[in-house]
Image: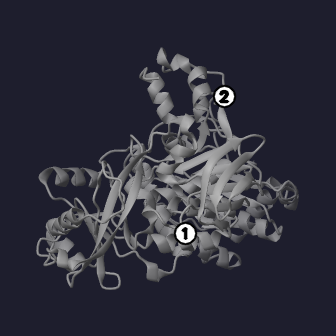
Amino acid sequence: MKSSRKLRAFADPQCLAVNSAVHTSVASLEKRRGELEEKYRHRRLFDRVNKANASIQVLDPEFGSGLDFLLTWQLWQQAGCSAALTYVAISELPYSLEQLRLCHQQWPQFKDLAVALQAQYPLPIKGFHQLDFGLVKLILVQASRAEALAQIQAEFDVCLGSAEASQATYQAPWQRSLNGLGRGNKVAVIGAGISGTATAYSLSQRGFEVTLIEQGANIACGASGNRQAMLYAKLPDNATLAGQFHQQGLQHSMALLKRSLNPCHWQACGLLQLAKSAQEQKQMQAVMLRNYPKSWLQYVSQQEAETIAKQPLAAGGLYFPHSGWVSPADWCAALFQLSGAHLWCNSQVLKLTQADAWQLSIAGEHQGQHRFDAVVLANANAAKALVPQQRLTLQSIRGQVSYVTSDQAPQVVVCGEGYVTPAQKGMLAVGASYNLHADDLVLSEQDHVDNLMRMSDVMPQSTATSLAAIQGGRVGFRSVTPDYLPMVGQIADETQFIQRFAKLRQDANYKFADSVPYLEGLYINAGHGSKGLISAPLSAEILACQMANQALPVAQCVAWGLDPNRFLIRDLMRRKR
């Protein structure tokens, strides 16, 4: 089944009404088990996908209390299934977590599975939520059925209930599903920062054989090597694709941190975004009108903010109780360890050549010619040099973080023009500079001074005002795109793309029968800017699902908004190419 194609974000309000618990009888549950066994043809369906080394995809239009999901998961276990199970469910009126627990208490046969579901169960925020149970993935879409079906992109083996068939609407070639790869294919991921390690983790979960190739001596040598960084989503005051992506990215990263990283390397301590002007205050109040759950987002006064931070602050503003900080370098290392990928450090990819597969010319410790079925460019701005004919619209921005000693550490991350983190090993991370015109790695004294001013801007009573408080710092180079959203997906042959879709210059609504001339097996996950900690892991999941032919963990409109070929389309429509 395929959905209709509507390129728009989920409408407000963002907080959904909560359902009331429904008590299912033992008899009705047993009847439902029989119905599901018939739907799946019991073990025969699982055996078929096992032999094909494929995955099972199920659509459930009425998630309710999740009993059908628990039944499906149990049947999958009983079949001894080694194939992946992706269960996409729609929840129009989500249960609260407490209601879910009360309902599940009636079914002790599901106890372990129910507890696992409850541990990852999301707040009633409109949109896509991916719950990860290893080979079993639950993509819970909290929205009206019409909105949800318009944004789900997948082919399903089984549809439970009565999901409306989609209308046969035109779909632009660049909005169609990609042709993925087979499990076990060899994939080279170039770059071992947060983008590369998250991609290696997501691909390995789906059965790919992954090799991480890093030109530096270690993982996280670039911008991902900072000791401490914030997890921050700047939300818009209306429904946008970027806002939807960053909102889900923050939720995804915080959930992944719980599963992947030792708590000594991160804290969900909370984050304050201060309103330093009347305009910022107005914008934040408009954000609050979008009606997020109060347990996820609040507007606090200056006094309330100071109580939360346990420090004098310059203003009140938005408070994200479930956000915080992380050590990016430690997170990259943890994701790599969990991936089981191969790691080639001190290895620089000099050239990519496409034949029946991809040949990588490498200098350094693994010098020579190496063959891979697919390549993922996750090396930020350096990706441009490997595909010069594609003219990737990536730009480098220098950023410097300062490490400051102070006994006035906030208890939460505090953001204004810059940010200040809670203390780690006696030092705060303060930053970051934003320089489009510098390209050196030498620490700048002026950037240190500017960072101290950023700290004073949000914490006006800070006594750390001189360079004597600086105990070092770090320079990194962010990679950004013209619209500040990353490039995630398969790269097209630029010359053929422009020739094939030239009619966009005269008619932006022209209906093409042609397909996109993709470069088979070449993908990218780059351009995350300053929000890589919340955008790169979710982007890695999107990319891995595309490559594995699995249901996307985000709305179609979000996936389209990240497509790396979108700038070609825009240039053609604007007659720039």
**For residue 296, what is the image quadrant?**
bottom left
Vertical arrangement, residue 95 with respect to residue 386, above or below: below
Identify residue type, mark 1. Answer: Ala
Residue at x 60% of width, y 78% of height: 105
Vertical arrangement, residue 97 with respect to residue 125, above or below: below
Identify residue type, mark 2. Answer: Ser
| Image location of residue 221, percent across then percent down | 48, 66
Image quarter of the N terminus: top right
| Image location of residue 311, percent across then percent down | 18, 78
Residue at x 65% of width, y 78% of height: 111
Residue 59 in view in this figure: no
**For residue 5, what is the image quadrant?**
top right
Residue 531 in view in this figure: yes
* The one of 114 and 269 positioned closer to us in this rendering: 269
Vertical arrangement, residue 122 with respect to residue 102, above or below: above
Residue at x 50% of width, y 71% of height: 331
* The one of 216 and 157 positioned closer to us in this rendering: 216
| Image location of residue 559, percent across then percent down | 53, 44
Residue at x 50% of width, y 39% of height: 392
Sequence-wise, the earlier of marks 2 and 1 is 1
Q: Which residue is mark 1?
A: 217
**For residue 101, what is the image quadrant?**
bottom right
* Disc marking residue 515: 2
| Image location of residue 336, percent across then percent down | 60, 69
Mark 1: secondary structure: loop
* The one of 185 and 58 positioned closer to us in this rendering: 185
Q: In the visual, does 519 lie left or right of 427? A: right
